[in-house]
Amino acid sequence: MLLESKYNLLISVKRLEHFEQKKEYAVFCPVGQASYAEGVDLISRAVLRCRRQKIEKLLFDSTGLARFRPPGMSEQYNLAERIASDAKSSVKIAHVASPAWVHSGKFGVMVATNRGLAAKNFTSATAALKWLLTPAEKQSGIRHTTGFESSGLSRIEA
């Protein structure tokens, strides 16, 4: 059974199954057993596909991936760096995840934002899609900060 699910995941990775292009965005909802590293590879491939196909918005739902656990601090940093590099500031990403992932992923979102990536974690696909489809200039009350603003220092002074 485990061999069969691993085989199905390998097929899914090669074909990037569960990736669907909509009118204004793409949706990627992989399903199956995936380690953290395999899950990272899946999102990376989906982001690269969006960038190549000039799809500017991606709704990524990882709730169907068993074993895709919330990352630690260093993993969040590495994930944010990789996905920001893959996206090259041309793909906005809304990630639907478990409450534990959303709670622990705030540092990763900050790193991604500081690298020019518009990304945010959500526990609800409805909220994620609303954020994804709302232009940045119309997202009232949403402000991404680096942490420097609250200290009174600018990025240059820090």
Image (cartoon, rainbow, N blue to C red):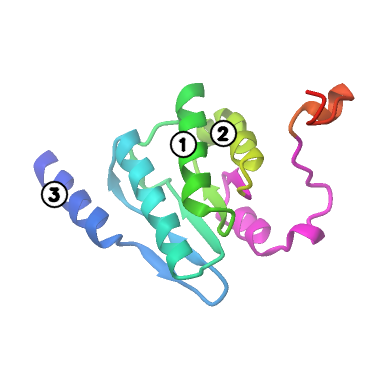
Residue at x-position 71% and y-position 63%: 134
Determine which quarter of the picture holds residue 15: bottom left
Front tag of 1 and 3: 1
Would you call the spot at circle 1 few (<14 residues within 10 Å), some (14-19), or many (20 or more)?
many
Q: Pointer 2: what residue?
A: 108
Q: CA distance from mark 2 to mark 3?
A: 30 Å
Q: Quadrant of the N terminus?
A: top left
Mark 3 or mark 1, which is nearer the start of the sequence?
3
Please provide percent x and percent y for residue 136: 74, 58
Question: Disc 2, disc 1: CB below 8 Å?
Answer: yes
Residue at x-position 50% and y-position 43%: 97
Q: Secondary structure at mark 1?
A: helix
Please provide percent x and percent y for residue 89: 59, 54
Q: Pointer 3: what residue?
A: 7
Hey, what amino acid is under mark 3? Answer: Tyr
Of residue 157 and residue 29, the one placed in the foreground of this image is: 157
Q: CA distance from mark 1 to mark 3?
A: 25 Å
Is 152 a magenta residue? no
Q: Pointer 1: what residue?
A: 79
Hey, what amino acid is under mark 2? Answer: Gly
Is residue 72 in view from this perspective?
Answer: no
Is 125 a magenta residue? yes
Would you call the spot at circle 3 few (<14 residues within 10 Å), some (14-19), or many (20 or more)?
few
Please provide percent x and percent y for residue 86: 46, 50
Front tag of 2 and 3: 2
Is residue 93 in view from this perspective?
Answer: yes
Q: Secondary structure at mark 3?
A: helix
Magenta highlight range: 118-145
Question: Disc 2, disc 3: CB below 8 Å?
Answer: no
Hey, what amino acid is under mark 1? Answer: Leu
